[in-house]
Amino acid sequence: MMTGKYQNQIPDADLSALDMLMWQFNREQGNWTEDLTPPEPKVLPKSVADLTVTFINHCTFLIQVCGLNILTDPIWSERASPFSWAGPKRQRQPGLRFEDLPPIHAVLVSHDHYDHMDAPTLNLLNKVHQPKFFTPLDNADTLQQESITDCTELSWWQSAELAPNIKLWLVPGRHFSGRWAIDHNDTLWGGFVIEAPAGKIYFAGDTGFGPHFKEIHEKLGPMRLAILPIGAYKPRNLMETYHLSPEEAVQAHQVLKANTSIASHFGTFAMADDGQEEPVRELEKALAKHTVPKSDFLVLAQGQTLDLSK
């Protein structure tokens, strides 16, 4: 951290506010189709001895591991925005109804962007489940505005105990932060690694490609599961620093030596110029190009549960 601002491990692209403004006025948005069919009721186990993962939407996953129920970047709101009338609008309903969640023990919030730190959802989770919250440095103030007090802030490579035999690491990502125009990079961002008897689980949050993937593998070893973003990657001149392309997600899977990877950050909110199905199509091409079996890098339907029990 320099001059009061957090920084990535490698320099960001040299982009100006004008570059972003010009993009907003000249966007070439891919095709999106709104389907707001509500999900069917679903009964999930209250506890899982080994490991299951349910894809809810965007970067929201329910990770059930060794008796703990963990949510990542939860969002059930209709918009990824501070406003109810503007900002990226939901194109698909969450794959799991909020009321069908099992008891939630921990919530991981990777950074402060509205599609990852959704205040109404976090507020409701706190009221209904009273979980422990974990987030990178300087994000607790925002959570405290939602009356969330059981919040642990972590720096890169700092760890905390989720349970007597389960450790949580905050690991580097290549991204940025800010909820308003005046707070750019005032708070830290990152990914999480859950270190449990069932294996290590990596949740990337938002990230571009960089040396942190190799560093994560070298320090923490191969991942049993990696949850990697594949969407919001166009146009590349603006997004390359901050968002993996589908091909870069495959390369990250390889660097991490993950046994299984799952795609995230696609299909729910039109955050950039790629179309709704484009990231999935490009992921399939990248898997073939890099000779990675489709069974090693999965695209789950919203609401689908993957049982990784041994």
Image (cartoon, rainbow, N blue to C red):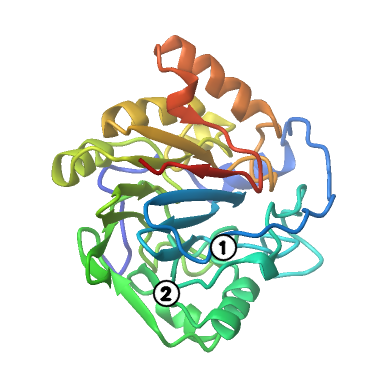
Residue 300, percent across and down? 59, 37
As displayed, is residue 250 above or below residue 240? above
Residue 218, percent across and down? 15, 39
Q: Quadrant location of the C terminus? A: top left
| Mark 1 closeness class: few <14, some 14–19, many ≥20 residues within 10 Å | many
> What's the residue type where badge 1 is placed?
Pro
Residue at 47% across, 69% down: 183
Pick whichever of labels 2 and 1 is earlier in the sequence: 1
As displayed, is residue 288 above or below residue 211? above
Q: Nearer the viewer, residue 181 or 38?
A: 38
- The residue tagged 2 is 133
Q: What label sits on residue 74 in the rendered view? A: 1
> What's the residue type where badge 2 is placed?
Phe
Residue at 57% across, 42% down: 19
Residue at 30% across, 43% down: 11
Q: Quadrant location of the N terminus? A: bottom left
Residue 149, percent across and down? 43, 88
Residue 219, percent across and down? 14, 45
For label 1, the SS is loop
